[in-house]
Image: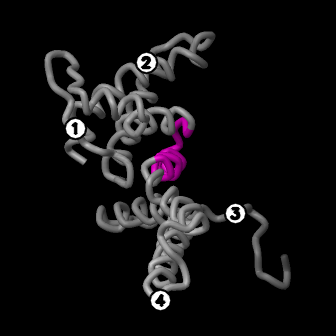
Amino acid sequence: MKLGSFTGEGAVPVTAEKRSIGAAVLDFLVGVFQPLVPAIAGAGILKALLSLLTLIGVMETTDAWYTVLYNGADAALYFLPLMVAVTMSTKLKCNRLVALGAVGALILPGMTTAITEGLTLFGFTVQNIAYSYQVFPAILTVALLYFVEKWVTKISPKPIRVFFVPMICFLIVVPVSLLILGPLG
């Protein structure tokens, strides 16, 4: 304490630095998308390499290796909404598995089939949109989930929260996402 000229009165409180709205939004977006970069970059480079190998005649698009590698790389992009659900829910500190389920409902093959065949909810036809490969519907879905989860947690009795909160979240978030947030995104 003598060498450092400390008084021994404890830590000095750090004042929070005020940030502009733009800086806060940018920080949020970086927090959501930065963890996705390795998967997206790796998948994109592998797809480019496969295109190059087929262009120079080393590989054919009908080869088994091409099929396996192309689909392996494509999976990172196809399931991008699910990966966004994980990073977004982590950033917002809401239930990651419920976020995965809510966003997963948008790309579930059974839901895709139902939408293609003309699904109607509350008298409104659900728009035929393919949600795989898309990020904005996932972002909007998890944002809604955050608020719904927070509200339902506050009003629900503690003994039933473990199943009641996720159930109500699915009940509200999935239909609203299909009717409004998905098409908006």
Which residue is the site of mark 1?
Answer: 128
Q: Secondary structure at mark 2?
A: helix
Image quarter hosting the N terminus: bottom right
Give the extent of the magenta segment. 82-96
Badge 1 marks a residue whose secondary structure is loop
Picture coordinates of residue 2, whole percent (x, y): 85, 80
The alpha-carbon separation of the residues under discs 3 and 4 comes to 65 Å
Please say if the residues under marks 2 and 1 sit with CB atoms less than 8 Å apart: no
| Nearest the eye: 43 or 4 | 43
Q: Which mark is residue 56?
A: 4
> Which residue sits at x=73%, y=61%?
10
Contact (CB < 8 A) between labels 4 and 2? Answer: no
Q: Is residue 80 above or below residue 122?
A: below
- Indicate the amino acid at tag 1: Asn
- Mark linked to residue 11: 3
| Residue 93 painted magenta | yes
The residue at the point 25 percent across, 48 percent down is 185
Mark 3 or 4, nearer chain start: 3
User: Which amino acid, by three-letter code, is at mark 2?
Assistant: Ile
Give the numbered dot on residue 168: 2
Kindly report the secondary structure that dominates the magenta region of the rendered protein: helix
Instruction: Tell me which numbered mark, 3 or 2, is placed earlier along the sequence.
Output: 3
Question: Hey, what amino acid is under mark 3?
Answer: Ala
Left or right of residue 182, residue 170 in this image: right
Q: What is the x, y in percent for residue 138? A: 38, 46
Point out the frontmost of discs 3 and 4. 4
Sequence-earlier tag: 1 or 3: 3
Q: Quadrant of residue 142?
A: top left
Decide: marks 4, 1 in contact (CB < 8 A)?
Answer: no
Provide residue 17's location: percent of width, then percent of height. 44, 67
Give the foreground label among 1 and 3. Answer: 1
